Image (spheres, rainbow, N blue to C red):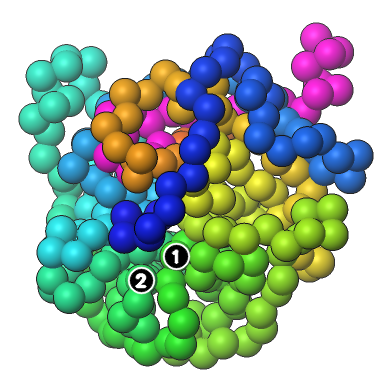
């Protein structure tokens, strides 16, 4: 997630198009290890250092990080088939953050966009239509990913913890420890709430985990190493990051920092695949 860390996590960039090739985590009986199918692909601007990704109807909202470059943008889900038009298309809306802020996770709730900042302890509240700043609140700790369960905003901070905040003033209501087979799952990053579960990117891993928000247990996982291998990545920090649920197509849009593409994937349980 952060390009100022002094270590680099190595990951495999080979394997077939279906998931579970080159898996980085051993399979455990209490976790469902999904396969996936790529349903669609679209372009993604390589200027975007993706931190948060949201799809609402036909509109993507995305937060992009880095000091001096952080911004909030929106753009349509559907794009022109013309490659030149894709490259030159403008954002529908764009707001650049002041240089002292590093934009992080993003969530849309009740027509308001909530945008975290990394180490500045500030969450911005935007009008989703005009991008006007309606409020800004302080919080303690780092901001990485953000989503919501319809009642609370859920924040990750790069550790194994998920923090549940009030959408009224961002006051902290509870903290949940995330574990997989009894072991803490650290580096939780971008988040998305889907069908009662929190899905999370793990920074510098090519997989997503499905978390039960009642217990903190990882109940599902999907390895996207094979998909990542299809992407022309320009640096070790161009990692997988960004999950947006597409309700119309019942799939997940996934992308990464400065990736040239976004992918709509459908998750497949092993039993579902074998029964076809």
- Residue 136 versus residue 47 in the image, above or below: below
Q: Secondary structure at mark 1?
A: loop
Residue 42 seen in this snapshot: no
Tell me the residue at 77%/28% (across/down). 269
Residue 266, position as x, y percentages in the image: 60, 27
Horizontal and vertical percent for residue 243? Answer: 48, 45
- Asked where in the image residue 43 lies, by quadrant, the reply is top left
Nearest to the observer: residue 49 or residue 264 = 49
Residue 18 sits above or below residue 128 on the image: above
Q: How far from the left and from the top, in percent, is residue 201?
A: 54, 49
- Which quadrant does the C terminus fall into? top right
Q: Is residue 220 magenta?
A: no
Residue 221 — which label? none
- Which quadrant would residue 51 be assigned to in this image? bottom left
Q: Which residue is mark 1?
A: 144
Query: Bounds of the magenta span?
Result: 255-276
Q: In this orientation, does residue 89 appear?
A: yes
- Residue ID for mark 2: 118
Quadrant in the picture for the N terminus? bottom left
Closer to the camera in the image, 63 or 186: 186
């Amino acid at each position: 997630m952060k390009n100022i860390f002094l270590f680099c996590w190595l990951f495999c960039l080979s394997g077939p198009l279906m998931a579970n090739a080159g898996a980085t985590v051993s399979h455990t009986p209490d976790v469902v290890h999904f396969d996936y199918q790529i349903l669609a692909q679209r372009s993604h601007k390589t200027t975007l250092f993706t931190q948060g990704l949201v799809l609402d109807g036909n509109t993507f909202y995305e937060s992009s990080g880095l000091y001096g470059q952080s911004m909030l943008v929106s753009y349509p889900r559907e794009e022109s088939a013309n490659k030149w038009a894709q490259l030159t298309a403008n954002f529908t809306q764009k707001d650049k953050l002041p240089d002292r802020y590093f934009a992080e996770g993003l969530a849309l709730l009740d027509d308001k966009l909530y945008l975290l900042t990394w180490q500045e302890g500030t969450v911005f509240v935007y009008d989703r239509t005009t991008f006007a700043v309606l409020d800004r609140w302080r919080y303690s700790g780092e901001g990485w990913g953000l989503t919501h369960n319809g009642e609370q905003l859920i924040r990750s901070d790069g550790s194994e913890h998920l923090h549940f905040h009030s959408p009224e003033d961002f006051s902290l209501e509870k903290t949940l420890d995330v574990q997989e087979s009894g072991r803490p799952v650290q580096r939780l990053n971008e988040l998305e709430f889907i069908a009662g579960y929190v899905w999370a990117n793990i920074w510098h891993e090519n997989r997503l985990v499905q978390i039960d928000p009642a217990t903190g247990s990882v109940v599902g996982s999907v390895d996207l190493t094979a998909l990542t291998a299809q992407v022309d990545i320009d640096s070790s920090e161009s990692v997988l990051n960004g999950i947006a649920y597409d309700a119309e197509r019942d799939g997940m849009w996934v992308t990464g920092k400065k990736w040239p593409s976004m992918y709509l994937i459908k998750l497949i349980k092993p039993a579902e695949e074998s029964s076809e």
